[in-house]
Amino acid sequence: MIKSDKWIKYMCEKHNMISPYDESRIKRVENVISYGISSYGYDIRLSKFFKVPVLKNTNKKGFSVDPKDKDILLKFKDVECNDAYFVIEPNCYVLGQSVEYFRMPRNVLGIPFGKSTYARCGLIVNLTPFEPEWEGFVTISLVNPTRWRIKVYPGEGIAQVIFLESSEECLLSYADKKGKYQKQETISLPKV
């Protein structure tokens, strides 16, 4: 069952499901991409931390990005954006992180979607489901497939999470599996 704003508020206040939690429903300031509680979800914010690929020789025949590459960390640089916006170049992608830290209950699944404001600019905001008993900051893939630069705004909305609650707990949670992205504090690159 999809959960309402009342349930989300209760889970945040009593069980610290989202931290920090913002119960505001409307834009607090004009010209800000909205975030916080919504009728049946929660709009998360983009932090100021990014991992930017520094891949060289990508035009070389046979080049590929491999999630099993043990040296993948060497192919990204950490960037902290202290400006009002961060630019994603044409035909590029970066990894970002949420401002909010999530603690998913054992009987709840979070399904995130990119905000329509960015979709209408051509930006693809990709996040994966928040499994039962997963916790951490969210790593967010931001893909610019267009021919123009796209600005994203740290501290403002980037995606919405819809919460689904089951009437029973799952047999095997993310914590039970000892998931490799459990309790991530920073942007996580692929792990195998």
Image: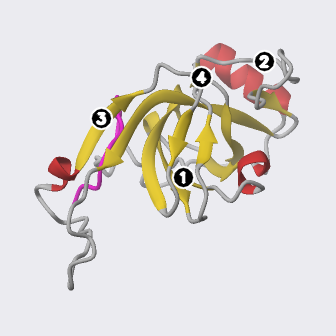
As measured in the structure, the alpha-carbon distance from the residue carrying label 4 to the one carrying label 1 is: 23 Å
Marking on residue 78? 3
Q: Secondary structure at mark 1?
A: loop
Residue denoted by label 1: 127
- Dot 2, how many residues are within 10 Å of its Cα: few (below 14), some (14-19), or many (20+)? some
- Dot 4, how many residues are within 10 Å of its Cα: few (below 14), some (14-19), or many (20+)? few
Residue denoted by label 2: 23
Residue denoted by label 4: 84
Q: Quadrant of the C terminus?
A: bottom left
Residue range in magenta is 181-192
- Of mark 3 and mark 4, the one earlier in the sequence is 3
Q: Secondary structure at mark 4?
A: loop
Image depth: mark 2 or mark 4 in front: 4
Residue under the image location 22 percent in, 77 percent down: 63
Of the residues shown, which amino acid type is indicated by label 4? Ala
Q: Secondary structure at mark 3?
A: strand
Q: Are marks 2 and 4 in contact (CB under 8 Å)?
A: no
Image depth: mark 2 or mark 3 in front: 3
Q: Is residue 10 above or below residue 77?
A: above
